[in-house]
């Protein structure tokens, strides 16, 4: 079967909320991802680092992601840098 657009383009449109699947009520995760996609596209249009930062901070748990990423090295940080 051939599609007029690529699978990647379709998934991008789906994430942006342009294309919606034929379903009754939307799952909360879909609503969240649609809002996140809108915010990221808006940040892209603005083209500034601060707009991306605001969108990421609005939707991501930045502190826990940082803690998880540091892993075992968090305990080795100087006390003054641990909270930051």
Image: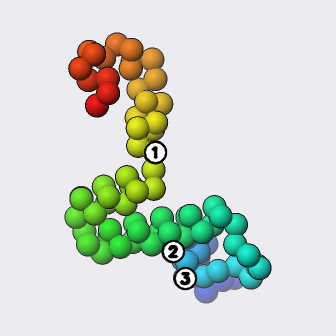
Element marked by disc 2: helix
Q: Nearer the viewer, mark 1 or mark 2?
A: 1
Element marked by disc 3: loop
49 sits left or right of 23 in the view: left
Is residue 12 at least partly visible in the picture?
no
Is residue 39 at least partly visible in the picture?
yes
* Distance Cα–Cα, label 1 vs label 3: 26 Å
Marks 2/3 in contact by CB < 8 Å: the verdict is yes
Element marked by disc 1: loop
Label 2 crowding class (10 Å Cα cut-off): few <14, some 14-19, many 20+?
some
Is tag 1's residue or tag 2's residue first in the polypeptide sequence? 2
Q: Which residue carries the number 3 mark?
A: 18
- In the image, which disc is placed on residue 17? none
Q: Residue at x 27, y 16 (%)?
A: 79
Q: Which residue carries the number 1 mark?
A: 61
Marks 1/2 in contact by CB < 8 Å: the verdict is no
Marks 1/3 in contact by CB < 8 Å: the verdict is no
Q: Residue at x 34, y 13 (%)?
A: 76
* Distance Cα–Cα, label 1 vs label 2: 21 Å
Q: Position of residue 22 (x, y in %)?
A: 74, 82
Q: Position of residue 14 (x, y in %)?
A: 59, 75
Which quarter of the image is occupied by the N terminus? Answer: bottom right
The quarter of the picture where residue 25 lies is bottom right
Question: Does residue 6 sit above or below 55 in this rendering?
Answer: below
Question: Does residue 78 sit above or below 13 in this rendering?
Answer: above
* Distance Cα–Cα, label 2 vs label 3: 6 Å
17 sits left or right of 25 in the view: left
Which quarter of the image is occupied by the C terminus? Answer: top left
Q: Which residue carries the number 2 mark?
A: 16
Label 3 crowding class (10 Å Cα cut-off): few <14, some 14-19, many 20+?
few
């Amino acid at each position: 079967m051939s599609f007029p657009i690529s699978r990647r383009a379709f998934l991008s449109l789906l994430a942006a909320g342009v294309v919606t699947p034929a379903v009754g009520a939307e799952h909360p995760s879909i609503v969240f991802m649609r809002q996140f996609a809108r915010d990221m596209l808006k940040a892209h249009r603005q083209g500034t680092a601060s707009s991306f930062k605001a969108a990421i901070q609005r939707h991501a748990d930045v502190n826990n992601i940082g803690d998880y990423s540091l892993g075992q090295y968090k305990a080795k940080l100087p006390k003054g840098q641990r909270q930051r």
